[in-house]
Image: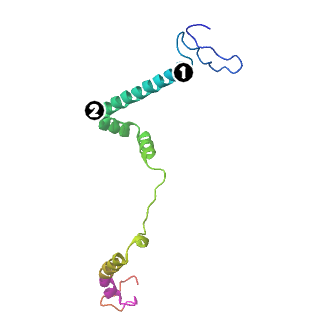
Amino acid sequence: MSIGKPAKDPKTGRFLPREPRVGAPIGAGAPARTRARKAVRSKLGELFLEDMLCAWESRGAAAIQALIEKNPHDFLKAVASLMPKDVTVNVNQIGEMTDEQLLERIRKLDAKIKPFLAAQGADGAGDGDRAAAEHE
């Protein structure tokens, strides 16, 4: 096996595990490398995110404005990718309201529709104190 290139399995083409270092305890080679790789990946990720934050703080708004002006399609794609995939909207909250809340809601609606009922008549037949519209 050459020093510079790791060995490959001739049948599968996959890389073979390295032989343990001379003098290292059996089984000590792979876990140490795995931990080291994870530590490097973690540190690299932290540094990358710090650099991204610095770039965002210095040029984020200007970069967004430039993207909107030069390529609005990509801007819309970016906005859409940030939106949640599933949105639950509870338009009708009556099922969650207490009896007191329901009564208060009814009173408020009653106060709002009283002027309209007076104009149309209580039965909706147009017997109110207002003249009927021309289109009726």
109 sits to left or right of 14: left
Q: Residue at x 35, y 87 (%)?
A: 120
Which residue does the numbered mark 2 point to in the structure image? 58
Q: For residue 134, what is the image quadrant?
A: bottom left
Q: Position of residue 66 (x, y in %)?
A: 34, 36
The residue sitting at the bottom extreme is: 127
In which quadrant will I find the N terminus? top right
Image location (x, y in percent) of residue 60: 31, 36
- Spatial CA distance of label 2 from label 1 is 42 Å
Asked which quadrant contains residue 44, the reply is top left
The residue lying toward the viewer, choosing from 116 and 96, is: 96
Q: Residues within 10 Å of mark 1 (few under 14, many from 20)?
A: some
- Mark sitting on residue 120: none
Q: In this picture, is 21 found above or below 80? A: above
Q: Residues within 10 Å of mark 2 (few under 14, many from 20)?
A: few
Residue drawn at x 43%, y 72% is 95
Of marks 2 and 1, the one in the foreground: 1
Q: Which stretch is magenta?
A: 113-126
Where does the image place residue 131, in percent across and percent down from the top left? 32, 88
- Disc on res. 30: 1
Rendered image coloring scheme:
rainbow
Q: Quadrant of residue 39?
A: top left
Q: Is residue 121 magenta?
A: yes
Q: Circle 1 — which element?
A: helix
Q: Which amino acid lies under the numbered mark 2 shown in the image of this protein?
A: Ser
Which amino acid is tagged 1?
Ala
Q: Residue furthest right?
A: 11
Question: Front-most of 134 and 122?
Answer: 122
Give whichever of 75, 4 is nearer the camera: 4
**In the image, residue 135 lies in the stretch drawn in magenta:** no
Outermost left residue: 58
Vertical side of 8 occupied by 109: above or below: below
